[in-house]
Image (cartoon, helix red, strand yellow):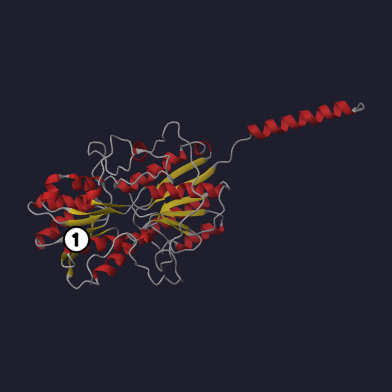
Amino acid sequence: MKFGKLTAASFGLALGLTGLLGAASAQDAPQKKYKIYLSLSYSGNNWMSETANIIKALAKTPPYDKMVELKEVISGTDPQAQIAAYESMIDAKADGVISFPISPTALNRVVKRGCDRGVKFFMYDSTVTERCAYNVSYISAGFGENTAQELVNSLGGKGKIFMVRGVPGTSVDKRHYEGAMHIFSKYPGIKVVSEYYGYWDDRIAQQETAKALAAHPDVDGIWSELGEAGTLNAVVDRGGKLMPIVGENMNGFRQGFLNEDYKARGLKGVSSGSPPATAGYAFKLMMEILTGKRDLEPVNIEYPLPWARSDEMKPCQGEAIADGCNVFDAKLVPQGFSTVIYDPALLPEINLQSALTGEPVPGMTIQPLPKEIVKAANEPGINCNRCDPPADLYKLTTATATVQP
């Protein structure tokens, strides 16, 4: 085969065409798809559904809608089932796993295996102690100790109380309980007369609180993890005088603080804890790391503690989350709906419908996270194993002790 001479002009033209074809090929090349698994341990309450919906909405928000292949797996409350789920995700060559872990320790071995295979593990709200995982949680911000102090203040340092716990074995329940008991143990006048699990479910919490009220009708106050809307219902259903209750941020609980009859009968307290927005924050951090927009080694990251006293309830106007509103109309959401779904700096992409349906906000695009993160303190058995806790582990960060031990 003969080739003719290539002139300088034709050579330049060939190079130009090659460059244009190369640029077009690069532009037309398919964008990398990230295989992400959403691993839920249990399901059935509003909070867990909201966290899943927030993650799904973000995965459908540009540009992630073209970059993320999201699969959801619900494994239940048995650690062995979640271990098996993680194993399958690792074998399927997951790029990332975003998860609510059922145990802080039982999952460590499989998490380490995944990390060694290049999988990024992001835990939200609940935590693990395997150091290759990223823990994104508000629990180190002190829900237990701060709400306990608020209850002690309301009772003047004396009284009989109930403690409504969450799901046994989780780092969340463990940390909340230990923080609260650290405060209650300082006050000899505070007597815990009933302690029971509400499983972070308003229906179960209502049933169990009704039983406790039948046995201890003279209770003076209640400390409650998630499910507190049901806790309040049980107290209201009994009739008569109400009492101080500290709990999380279920809409039905916050609505109670707006009820003039309830307030006249003695209801007061604080609404804090369990922001579903933590899940969205964790997902966005994971995607920034996977896409190379953020360089961050595995670390424990703290989400700020929500905090609203009973006299600080501000109704939202319709579905809009604006002007510091913090409670929705009861016609829009179930009583067990957790209200902290949005953050103007960390999670501006989410609205009420996103948390309810998993659909993205029309016209919204993913916004970059603030450069700085807040690192959580080391807490043995919560987010680390061989580590030393700070000397002031249970220091009050939001509440102030107005009653001295």
Q: Is residue 93 visible?
A: no
Instruction: Return the x and y of residue 154 as percentages of the image width and height.
Output: 19, 61
- Residue situated furthest left in the rendering: 240
Q: Is residue 183 visible?
A: yes
**Quadrant of residue 80 within the rendered picture:** bottom left
- Residue situated furthest front in the rendering: 402
Q: Please tell me which residue lies in front, 97 or 110.
A: 97
**Quadrant of residue 101 within the rendered picture:** bottom left
Q: Please tell me which residue lies in front, 178 or 24.
A: 178
**Left or right: 150, with 109 as reference point:** left
Give the structural element (helix, strand or loop) at label 1: helix
Instruction: Return the x and y of residue 385 as percentages of the image width and height.
Output: 44, 69
Counting labels gives 1
> What residue is at 23 percent from the left and 47 percent from the top?
254
Residue occupied by mark 1 = 154
Task: Count neighbours of disc 1 (C-alpha within 10 A) and say few if under 14, some if 14 to 19, many if 20 or more.
Answer: many
Q: Is residue 339 placed above or below 245 in the rendered structure?
A: above
Instruction: Return the x and y of residue 150 as percentages of the image width and height.
Output: 24, 60
**Left or right: 186, with 125 as reference point:** left
Instruction: Return the x and y of residue 105 as percentages of the image width and height.
Output: 41, 64
Q: Please tell me which residue lies in front, 100 or 191.
A: 191
**Screen quadrant of the C terminus:** bottom left
Q: Amino acid at mark 1?
A: Ser
**Screen quadrant of the N terminus:** top right
